[in-house]
């Protein structure tokens, strides 16, 4: 009886290549039920190859290790690509599967390393390795390091490992290599093989629930990035929305990846190592309650463009830079807002409340016009309760200088650039009113 596998499972137009990496070490003669592990693997793998024959945009290949030299020879390079990637190579693969006889040792790391050269150098394809083994590394290699290097280089996606008859204790040794599945019986092996190939071929579905303070998935309209958790490769971006039933809309993703999900709220939220089982709808949840911060300049603004730096309250951690006369959503909490007007203003512990708008206003500015045809160095100070606070430096080069300032009392201190006597520094007080220009002749 063949394995049921739908030709419609391949929902993407991207070409997928699956390399079956089969362990043919001597230990595969061990029993699995009424037969050997090797015979079970050969039987089930042959059925799987049959089921894949009519799937479009799919190519398969077969690499085997431990099948040419005896175990006593301890040959740690005993691996070979028996059938390379090609269309209509299914009968050839089945023939080679039938001819395999277990002999040698277990060389996983070296086999994975050589497998990298089995895939054609085509950047648009999805390259997947399915490793079927009954043992752990015996040749002092590091399968974890090899696998992670191949993933980071973009050669393959995270490999699948089917542990044939391995104890559960061995699972931890394969977690760093790829997605591990245990198959202790022939029925379990058949189910696992179907699951793995399904994950290799199918897109699956998920939704991202952005929870408000009441725990309801009603936050929306933010961009979400899906990143491969191992290689760091960007997979896709979507703009979150609620569907016509006011539920988070369905997202279709490739289950061959494990994902880091970045929700681009302000500040962003990162959800790491999200696994999407093929054929299942996965709900990804995170708390993301949001309110709005509106920054307003009263009256007609004299600023070309005025920004504010938003910090996490009580820290110097910059969360965002927001332009005035805009409204932006933030995760609820408290923020410090530094307004980059002159003089600069700092508003501490500005509260952002669920589904509410926090409005932060500053006065309409005025300006001072320093009228001169000479060159000066100088500074402007804000005068408040008898205290002087430095505002800005002034560099005048033979022309009038206009500076936009918040309303208040000020003083300008100047010295001619060619004047070498500090005693000739000149100070002039002045006041700024909203929407008005103060002229000072120098």
Image (cartoon, helix red, strand yellow):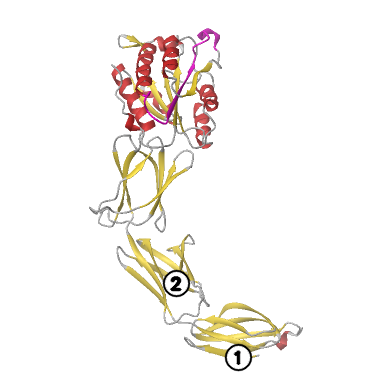
Q: Nearer the viewer, residue 237 or 366?
A: 237
Q: Which quadrant holds the N terminus? A: top left
Rendering coords of residue 397 (x, y %): 69, 81
* In the image, residue 293 above or below residue 343: above
Q: How many marks?
A: 2
Residue ID at (33%, 25%): 194
First-in-chain label (1 vs 2):
2
Q: Which residue is mark 2?
A: 324
Q: Which residue is mark 1?
A: 440
Q: Quadrant of residue 163 in the image? A: top left
**Mark 1, other Cα within 10 Å: few <14 / some 14–19 / many ≥20:** some
Left or right of residue 361, residue 403 in this image: right
Rendering coords of residue 233 (x, y %): 48, 42
Which residue extends farthest left? Answer: 245
Verify whether residue 62 appears in magenta.
yes
Q: What segment carries the magenta color? A: 52-74
Residue ID at (59%, 82%): 380
**Mark 2, other Cα within 10 Å: few <14 / some 14–19 / many ≥20:** many
């Amino acid at each position: 009886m063949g394995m049921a596998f739908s030709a419609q499972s391949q929902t993407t137009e991207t070409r997928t290549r699956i390399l079956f990496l089969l362990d043919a070490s001597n230990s595969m003669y061990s029993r699995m039920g009424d037969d050997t592990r090797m015979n079970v693997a050969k039987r089930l793998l042959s059925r799987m190859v049959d089921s894949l024959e009519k799937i479009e945009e799919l190519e398969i290949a077969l690499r085997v290790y431990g099948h040419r030299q005896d175990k006593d020879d301890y040959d740690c390079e005993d691996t070979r690509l028996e059938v390379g990637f090609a269309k209509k190579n299914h009968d050839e693969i089945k023939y080679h599967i039938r001819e395999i006889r277990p002999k040698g040792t277990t060389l996983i790391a070296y086999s994975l390393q050589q497998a990298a050269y089995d895939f054609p150098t085509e950047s648009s394809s999805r390259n997947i390795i399915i490793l079927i083994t009954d043992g752990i590394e015996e040749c002092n290699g590091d399968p974890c390091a090899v696998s992670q290097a191949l993933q980071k280089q973009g050669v393959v996606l995270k490999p699948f490992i089917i542990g044939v008859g391995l104890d559960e204790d061995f699972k931890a040794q394969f977690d760093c290599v790829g997605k591990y599945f245990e198959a202790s019986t022939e029925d379990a092996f058949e189910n696992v093989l179907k699951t793995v190939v399904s994950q290799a071929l199918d897109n699956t579905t998920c939704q991202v629930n952005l929870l408000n303070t009441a725990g309801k998935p009603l936050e929306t309209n933010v961009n979400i990035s899906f990143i491969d958790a191992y290689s760091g490769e960007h997979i896709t971006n979507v703009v979150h929305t609620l569907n016509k039933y006011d539920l988070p809309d369905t997202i279709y993703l490739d289950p061959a990846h494990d994902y880091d999900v970045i929700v681009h709220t302000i500040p962003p939220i990162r959800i790491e190592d999200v696994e999407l089982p093929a054929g299942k709808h996965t709900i990804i949840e995170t708390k993301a309650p949001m309110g709005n911060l509106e920054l307003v300049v009263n009256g007609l603004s004299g600023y070309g463009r005025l920004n504010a730096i938003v910090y996490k309250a009580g820290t110097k951690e910059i969360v965002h830079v927001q332009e005035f006369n805009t409204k932006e959503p933030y995760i609820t909490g408290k923020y410090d807002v530094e307004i980059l007007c002159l003089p600069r203003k700092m508003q501490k512990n500005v509260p952002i409340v669920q589904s509410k708008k926090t409005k932060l206003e500053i006065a309409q500015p005025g300006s001072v016009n320093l009228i001169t045809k000479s060159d000066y160095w100088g500074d402007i100070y804000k005068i408040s309760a008898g205290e002087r606070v430095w505002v800005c430096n002034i560099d005048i080069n033979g022309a009038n200088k206009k500076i936009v300032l918040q309303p208040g009392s000020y003083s300008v201190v100047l010295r001619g650039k060619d004047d070498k006597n500090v005693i000739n520094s000149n100070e002039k007080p002045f006041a700024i009113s909203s929407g008005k220009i103060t002229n000072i002749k120098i």
